Amino acid sequence: SLPEFVRLASAFWLDTGVRRQMVAFRKGLYDVLGAGAVSLWDFGPAELRRLFCGEDEVAWTEKELAEHLQCGGGYSSKSEQVSWLREEMLAMAPPLRAKFLEFVTSCPRLPPGGLKELQLSVHPDPADGTGLPRSRACAHRLFLPRYASREELARQLHEAIQSSGGHHEQQLPP
């Protein structure tokens, strides 16, 4: 009968069919976290997702960008290109912010703790061209050419984000 099938299928998918994997997962968790793993069972699914994956909503403020967007390689917080980048980041809608993060870090979410914990940095492009911005996702580093205007920066940044497919790794010149 249908009710019996649904009951058995649910039991398989949610209990007997995954029991070995859940036991192995729990054992691994205890191996890594020790006795502290017990406290994880106090959290609900949404809390655990936030704890391990960060917030669903990508939000930042002008103050956070000014404080936590790091500059290097010749850019400073007062550089025109960095100011324009902050303005563009503030103007982005949440879905574009997630794509921007994915372009720069390969992850569409901010880590737990937000922008402060991300340690995002912006550097002039070592190729010194005016092409698309590039990123080094493993270092959370954006290589931004020295564009002549905010409009050019916006156009090139949006093109890079939309065509990146998740990341656009920087290849340094020899």
Image: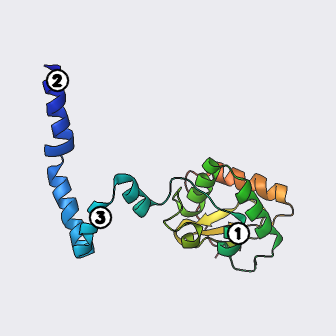
Residue at label 2? 3
Is the Cβ of the residue at disc 3 closer than 8 Å to that at disc 2?
Answer: no
The CA distance from mark 3 to mark 2 is: 34 Å
Secondary structure of the residue carrying numbered label 2: helix
Residue at label 1? 63
List the single residue furthest toward the right: 148
Secondary structure of the residue carrying numbered label 1: helix
| Residue 77 seen in the figure | yes
Query: Could you tell me the amino acid type at mark 2?
Result: Pro
Is the Cβ of the residue at disc 1 closer than 8 Å to that at disc 3?
Answer: no
Q: Quadrant of the C terminus?
A: bottom right
Residue at point 61%, 58% (across, down): 59
Residue at point 75%, 58% (across, down): 88
Residue 136 x, y percent position in the rendering: 58, 68
Query: Could you tell me the amino acid type at mark 3?
Result: Leu
Residue 133 x, y percent position in the rendering: 70, 61
Query: Could you tell me the amino acid type at mark 1?
Result: Lys
Label 1 crowd (10 A; few <14 / some 14-19 / many >=20): few
Answer with left or right where residue 157 lies relative to residue 15: right
| Residue 173 seen in the figure | no
Residue at label 3? 40
The CA distance from mark 1 to mark 2 is: 56 Å
